[in-house]
Structure formats: structure tokens, C-alpha cells
Amino acid sequence: MEVSNPAPEIQPLFADVDGTMCPSRLVLEHVTSRWGVLVLIALLERSYRFGELRRRVGGVSEKMLTQTLQTLERDGFVHRDAKPVIPPRVDYTLTPLGEDAAHRVKALALWTDERVPAVEAARARYDEARGQ
Amino acid sequence: MEVSNPAPEIQPLFADVDGTMCPSRLVLEHVTSRWGVLVLIALLERSYRFGELRRRVGGVSEKMLTQTLQTLERDGFVHRDAKPVIPPRVDYTLTPLGEDAAHRVKALALWTDERVPAVEAARARYDEARGQ
């Protein structure tokens, strides 16, 4: 009797054998999140206070920036430096781990920046082929 | 009469002088999107059909995968290869531009993967300091 081979199992990427997603997936999501990317790149320039950082990142709501900073702080990428002065002053800086992450994310951002003309040409071809 | 210096203007990152966000920000968001990252990394292995790719990415809904593939195809990162056979067969592959993007994204994912212990230690410290 012939036994047909079962289709090879496809395992999810960055998942454990039981299908649980690996923690690295979540860390990657934090550093590549819409605002995470820009916060890391901004903090590579210098430390920023909250309001300054919000202007530098651009287009981010207060709530989203707070949330992004908390996530990056908890992950150990950002250090929240609350100075015991009056009026209170809080600076956000990169930790060494955060600096390393930021350099990598920035390299990707610069690569993307250089590819914009190619991407725009691809979009024009795509839209034209669909009569849009 | 003394004139106080105005606070230096902070310009948003990846934005034009008029405050419009640069196209590179959007391209970066596409390649670093939650599912974009995993689709690019998966397609670096080989071309996949839709259902296979969905299993390989893991945890993605049909709708989100369709949308991610369309975005990456329109940007010129992914090629949708519809073969004129019966039954119809569609393979998704990386374009040379997509392959370049995928290598960079994968390098970032591997870097993240290696930093998981450091991130988990940072989280434990953060939570402990807050009595959680």
C-alpha cells in the first residue's frame, strides 16, 4: 500500500514549536513601531525633554508619545532622567542598548529614504496597470 | 535694549520644511510594519503561495496579509506571479529591491532576537521598581 507523503509542515517565523510567538517578535515590534522608530532616531541626536521630543518626532499625539516612551523605557532602550530640580525637569536619553538599536533603525531609515524614487516609480507602474 | 533669543525651532524628522511628512516615512512604515517585516523575512527563504505564506508568517488574518502584500507589491518590494494554469496558481516573490529591504529587516530581527535576554532583564527591573 502506498502512503502519500503529508505536505511539509510550515512553522510560523519567530514562534516556539507550540506556536507561541517568540518574545523577539514583540521587541522587534517595539523598535520598528511607527513612533518607536522616530523616537529612537531623534534620541540619537541628543537627549530631549518630552515637549521637544514631541516636536522633533512630529505628528505624534501626547498619548502615543507617552506610551511609546514607556514601552521603550521598560524594554531598556530609553532612560527617563527625572532631575530633582524646581520646576521638575525630565530628560529622555538612550541607554547603550537603545543607542545600538537606534543606529540600526536609522540605517534602515536612511536606506529607505534613498529608495523613495524607486518606490514611487513602482507605485506609478502599479497604479497605471490598474488604470488608476 | 536686550532682545532675548527665541527658543531654537525644532523641525520634525523626515518632514519637509512646510511640515509635510516625507514619503520615506511611509515607505519605512511599510517595511517595518508588524506583518511587513515577517512577510519580507519569509519571502527571503523562497517564494510562497498565499496560504503557505499565511502559515509561515503565523497569526496574521487573511485580510491583513492581503493588505500587506498589496502594499508591498505597490511599493515594488514584492512581485505577484499569477501563473496561467488551471487551477490558478499565484506565487509571491521578492523583487531585487524587496530582497535588499528584506536582508536589512532580517538583520534587525536577528539583532533583536539576540537582545531578548537583555530586554527581559530590563523589564523585570522596571516592573520591580514599580512594585508590579
Image (cartoon, coloured by chain):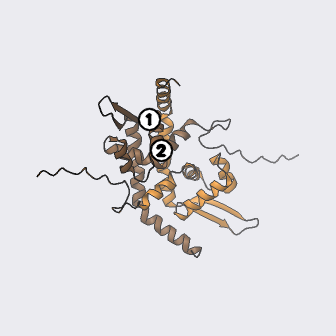
Chain colours: A orange, B brown
For marks 1 and 2 on the same chain, the one whose residue lies earlier in the sequence: 2
Q: Position of residue A48 (x, y in %)?
A: 64, 55
| Residue drawn at (37%, 60%) of the image | A19
Compare residues B128 and B79 and report the one nearer the observer.
B79
Residues at marks 1 and 2 touching, judged by CB atoms closer than 8 Å:
no
Marks 1, 2: nearer the viewer: 2
What kind of residue is marked 2? Lys
Q: Is B103 left or right of A63, judged from the image as shown?
A: left
Image height of A122 relative to B101, above or below: above
* Left or right of residue B82, residue A132 in this image: right
Same chain for the residues under marks 1 and 2 in the image: yes
Give residue B61's position: percent from left, percent from top.
45, 49
Q: CA distance from mark 1 to mark 2?
A: 15 Å
Residue density around tag 2, few if under 14, some if 14–19, many if 20 or more, within 10 Å: few
Q: Which mark is residue A26?
A: none
In the displayed structure image, the side of residue B13 where residue B96 appears, left or right: left
The residue under label 1 is which amino acid type?
Answer: Glu
Q: Residue at x 85, y 47 (%)?
A: B2
The front one of A33 and A117 is: A33
> Chain ID for label 2?
B
Name the secondary structure under disc 2.
helix
| Residue ID for mark 1 | B73
- Chain ID for label 1? B
Residue bearing mark 2: B63
At which x and y percent is residue B122?
50, 67
| The residue positioned farthest toward the front in the image shown | A1
* The C terminus of chain B sits in image quarter: bottom right
